[in-house]
Structures are given as C-alpha cells and as structure tokens.
Amino acid sequence: MRVAHVTVSYQEGLGYEENHLPFFQAAMGADVSIITSPLPLAWWQGLERFQSGTVPGVYEERGVRIHRLKARFRFRKGTQFLLEGLKSALREAKPDILHIHNPIGSLTVQALSAAKALGLPVVIDCHLWRFLTYPRGPVRRAYYQLFRRLFLPRYDSVIKRYIPLGPEPEDILRDLFGIPHSRMAHSTLGADTRSFRCDESVRLETRRSLGIPDDARVILFGGRIDPGKEVETLVEAWNSLAGKYGLYLLLVGPAVPGIAEELTQAAHPNAKSRLILTGLVPNTELPNYMSAADIAVWPGDPGITMNEAMACHNVLIHSDEAAGRHLTLYGNGAAFERGNARSLARAIDSILADPSRLADMRLRSRRLAEEVFDWKVVAARTLGIYNDVLQGTNTATAIWEPAIQRNQVLQS
C-alpha cells in the first residue's frame, strides 16, 4: 500500500503524530511519503533550536520520503499557507490513499482539491481539542461554518473517513462540523513503548542527577508550559502536599517567558528546593525524566506527552474534561475539577496514601500503553482503516469498547 501524509509541519526530534505514525507504517511494509513545509510549528518558532527551518527538497528518513515544499501565501502568523507544487508531489508519490492531518485550514483545502483532481481517496484525522476551538468569536465561528457548509461538503466525494483521535475530537467533528458517527473510524495518538518505558536503573540515575532521593515520590508535568496548561494549579496542589510526603515536582518542558519565574515564586519557601524545571528536553531524553516520576499530571490543556508518561508507568491525573478520559480506561488514573487546586490535591493524595494502589495503577498505565496506544498498534489500526477504504468495507470498531472490556477483566 502506498500512503501519502499531508501535514503543515514535520520536525525531526519531536513527539507528535507525524514524527511516529508514518514511520511505523513504513516499518510494517507500507510505502510512505510525508508532504510538508520547511517551517517549524508556530509555537516552537521562538526557540533557537528551530529557528533555521529546513531547505525545500526531497529527503529520505527511516524509510519514509519527505517532500518539503515551499510555503506560499502565509497568513495568521505563518500558521496558514499553501504548498508550492503539492499536486506534482502527489503525482510523484503515487499514493493509493491520502491522509490529511487536520479537518480545517488552507492546506487541507488545497490537499482536498488536489485529491479530487487526481481521484485519490482521502482520510482526515482530527486531533482538535476543545482548547483549540473555544472560545469562539464571530470570525472563528464564520471560519468553522465555511468548512462545515462549503469546503468539507464540496470534497465529500473523496473524503472516505474521518478519524477522531479521542473522544473530544469525536465530539468536535460531530458538533462543530456535522460529521455523523457512521463516517468515522476511531484511532488515537500514541507512544513508542520501546523507547518510553520505566527502566529502574535509568530511574535511579536520573533521580540522582536531579538531586532526588531514591525513595521520594515525584509528580511530573511534561510539555510546553504556557497559560493554557494551567501548571500554576499543579504548583498550588503540590504546595499543600509537599510537606506531607516530601514530594518533588518535576516540570519538564520549555516555558513561555515569565511563567517559570512565576511558578518558582509560587512555590512554598519550605518546598522550593523540591521544585525542578528542566527547560526544553529532546524527545529522546524524555523517557529518562518520565521514568523518574510516579504520577504525571496535566492540570489544563492536554498533550501527547500524556501517552508517553503512561508508557513510563506513570499514574495519570487529568482534568474532568473529555480530552483525557480515554487515557485512564484501565483504572490507571484519576480526574479532578479543572482549575480547582484542592480537587487536584485530593486526587494526588488519595493515590499517594495507598502505596499498593499506586503500584497497581502504574502497572495498569503500562498495560494500556502497550495494548491500545503503542504506535505500532496505532499504525496497524490506521492501515486497517485505509484497507477498509480501498476495499469498500467497514470493519472498524470503537476502540474504547474493547479497552473497557479489558479493564473489566483487570478489575475482576
């Protein structure tokens, strides 16, 4: 099977879907191309590591051809653009199926137009979350209506499946764009469980390098630290528990200007030495830090690092919104009221107070990562969706059902 992925940006060394899914598909025997721009993602553009971008051209990486095309007509701070020569690149790739990584945007419309002209069947995945689509002012509402009423219906003949990558993207496809459940085939974001795993020797070595005692309990947050992540709620909850457990808080990821200082100032004076901010950490080094932790918390907007922390045997705690509910299907985590530091502290406390429960939940996280969220499982699932499209069949099932059944077995 020949597959082409069209995505706004592909940056080597990050942990996003485009850094994994195409490559795991290629490892399973698919002929895979990525068609993208030379540009860094908008939220990484301020970091020196990603300033230069990449020269347009065709590259080969881990068995995947990467077509980097010039970005034209850039607007919205460079997040929207068209790719010069997209149709020609698709002719060169000769895919059996085209995978577009966003249901909205100028590049999506361009890719759909090219697919219709070339007679290519299309699947569109959706990992739009509530924080990306709300609040909606009149301009944004009009923008979404353009896709619901004009662009998506115009190319309906070539769009064979929509793939929501979680319950919240499913809700957004249905409620915001009017896509019926019958047009969907479910999948998820993933984690490379070969790299992301808890190695006891690495766990101890990383702790010692950070000055964390071997037997201490460690809470982790991983990802970009910006206002939407609401890490200040986590710091407030940690403050209330730090003395009780000698608890460490490990914040792994780049912080937007000013936030790191605010979080440090918010730490209780008696616990300040146990607050550790690492700054930007390459994806290849993240397993070391995640192995050092016991519980991983996302107090605000979700991130793909949740999957990776799960694979490293971390209990997951997330807000009570839809975005994270599929990540704790095996009884491997807990939810709290978003924005409520007391609610978050209670969730953490209830787990830390019972060491046997903590150990069991950590094992459940790893099982869920291996059985549902491993990138090789996700790649096989997605290739099955492609095959259904090409064969005119529909064998897809909602992945939450078997996961819930598996949890019932674990509970019994």
Image (cartoon, helix red, strand yellow):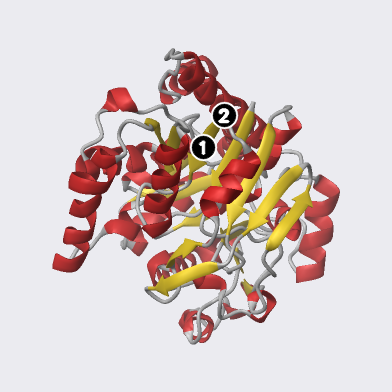
Going by the image, does 5 lie left or right of 63? Answer: left
Residue at (59% x, 40% y) in the render: 4
Q: Nearer the viewer, residue 63 or 222?
A: 63
Quote the CA–CA distance across marks 1 and 2.
7 Å
Residue position for label 1: 98
Q: Nearer the viewer, residue 122 or 102?
A: 122
Residue at (72% x, 27% y) in the render: 28
Mark 1 falls on what kind of element? Answer: strand
Q: Quadrant of residue 168?
A: top left
Where does residue 158 sit, x and y in percent of width and height?
Answer: 38, 32
Name the residue type under label 1: Leu
Residue at (45% x, 46% y) in the render: 350
Name the residue type under label 2: Asp
Going by the image, does 19 lie left or right of 116? Answer: right
Q: Nearer the viewer, residue 132 or 70?
A: 70
Residue position for label 2: 96
Where does residue 268 sit, x and y in percent of width and height?
Answer: 50, 79
37 to 352, vertically: above or below: below
Residue at (60% x, 61% y) in the render: 69
Mark 2 falls on what kind of element? Answer: loop
